[in-house]
Image (cartoon, rainbow, N blue to C red):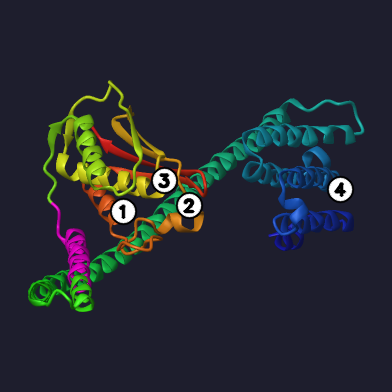
Amino acid sequence: MFVIVAAAGPERDPHFIFFLFLVAGLQIAEPRVPALATRRGSVFANLLKLGLGYLIIYHSGGITSSYYWILLIPVVSAATTLGVGGTLLFTVLACATYLSSLLSLDRELEVPADQVPELSLRLISLAVIGFLAQRLAEANRQEALHAQAVADQLAEANRNLQEAEAVARRSERLAALGQWSAGLAHELRNPLGTMRASAEMLLTNLPAENEVAAELAGFISSEVDRINSLVTRFLDFARPLEVRLEPAELSEVIDRAIAQLERDSPRQVTVYKNYSPDVPPFPFDAELIERVVYNLLLNAAQATQPGGAVTVKTRPVDGEVEVSVIDRGAGIHPDQLENIFNPFFTTKKEGAGLGLSVVSKIVDLHGGRITVESEPGKGSVFRLFLPCE
């Protein structure tokens, strides 16, 4: 554009051509030079363009110059980079720069009456084009922001879709494995029953003096019982659960779990109750939640030294009911916290690692959540949140 202006225009002054190409070079360099691409750099570049524009107008006829439009370049540049305030500022400066050309007149600062409309039209055109350029630039900025927001939403949706697909594939594999494992567990029970009956018959028919054989038969019977218990727990984990939501008193359910712990737990611990009176009856599966609380209490009791204490607390929290099981036992190492709800993960010498997996499964079926806070050597806090609305 500047080459065409220089070649086709009426002005051939070398100074004019030089200043014209300085403006062109500055306009091309502005978005490419990091120092000029900033807000402060843009202000500096547009001030330079105004100065060069004044020199171009001065060398091409002053106030009567046909190149007054060169002042539009800093105005439009400001409109695209500096917003409304910058556009207004450089529009005023451009008008002032053009009017300053009156100082180059040899006669007194008087404009012929017939030239006033033309002068006013030129000044108005600077303001109008600057305003329109700013509106267009603002519309482009808003459209770019909207497009970026849509792109971010699409990227997030794509990530979620990929994660959902991965979860679905993993769930299908786990479901197939669960069906196969459940069938295998059922098949194991028949030979286990035969082995136990054979061991009991052998123990009954052994001579009293054969103590070694009797002891071995007892080992067979006890180990069969242990394997059968493991198979039962595994089947409980693999079996689909049906949640029956009925209004019930949470404190009564917890009391039953505590009573069962006192009957079954081999370790003597004291369970302290801290029930909130503000927890009303709400719908949940009492049998399954009793199982959840029992598992949490059993883990807390096993982590606590004999004679220690475990605390159970309830309270309402933002449309949910929180049940906290607190112990001051060995705690859980931070590296193990992510895995404690995974099936078959356990840090105990005995156990299959299914207790907390079943807990997590039941809580998910209720639409609730479970969290854990633990510090090695200081104990753990399991928090169960159930929706009550």
Q: Residue at x 22, y 24 (%)?
A: 280
Give the Cα separation between the discs numbered 4 and 3: 94 Å
Q: Position of residue 30 (x, y in %)?
A: 73, 54
**How crowded is the residue under tag 3: few (<14 C-alpha within 10 Å), some, or many (20+)?**
many
Q: Amino acid at mark 4?
A: His
220 falls in the magenta region: yes
Residue toward you, 60 or 91: 91
Q: Which residue sits at x=45%, y=58%?
A: 336
Q: Earlier in the sequence, mark 1 or mark 2?
A: 2
Q: Which mark is residue 148?
A: 2
> Which residue position holds label 4?
59
Of the numbered discs 4 and 2, the one sitting upstream in the chain is 4
Which of 219 and 123 lies nearest the eye of the viewer?
Answer: 219
- Amino acid type at image mark 1: Leu
Tell me the distance, in whole angstroms, between the alpha carbons under discs 1 and 3: 17 Å
From this viewpoint, which residue is outermost toward the front? 209
Given this view, does label 1 or label 4 mark the residue nearer the observer?
Answer: 1
Which residues are drawn in magenta? 219-241
Along the polypeptide, which appears first: circle 1 or circle 3? 3
Furthest-top residue in view?
277
Residue 312's place in the image compared with 146, above or below, is: above
Instruction: Please report contact status of discs 4 and 3: CB closer than 8 Å, yes or no.
Output: no
Image depth: mark 4 or mark 2 in front: 2
Q: Nearer the viewer, residue 153 or 208?
A: 208
Question: What label does residue 120 carry, if any?
Answer: none
Image position, residue 292 (x, y; %): 25, 46
Q: Nearer the viewer, mark 1 or mark 3?
A: 3
Residue contact at pointers 1 and 4, CB within 8 angstroms: no
Residue that mark 1 sits on: 356
Q: Is residue 268 visible?
A: yes
Do the residues bearing badges 1 and 3 touch, measured as CB atoms within 8 Å?
no
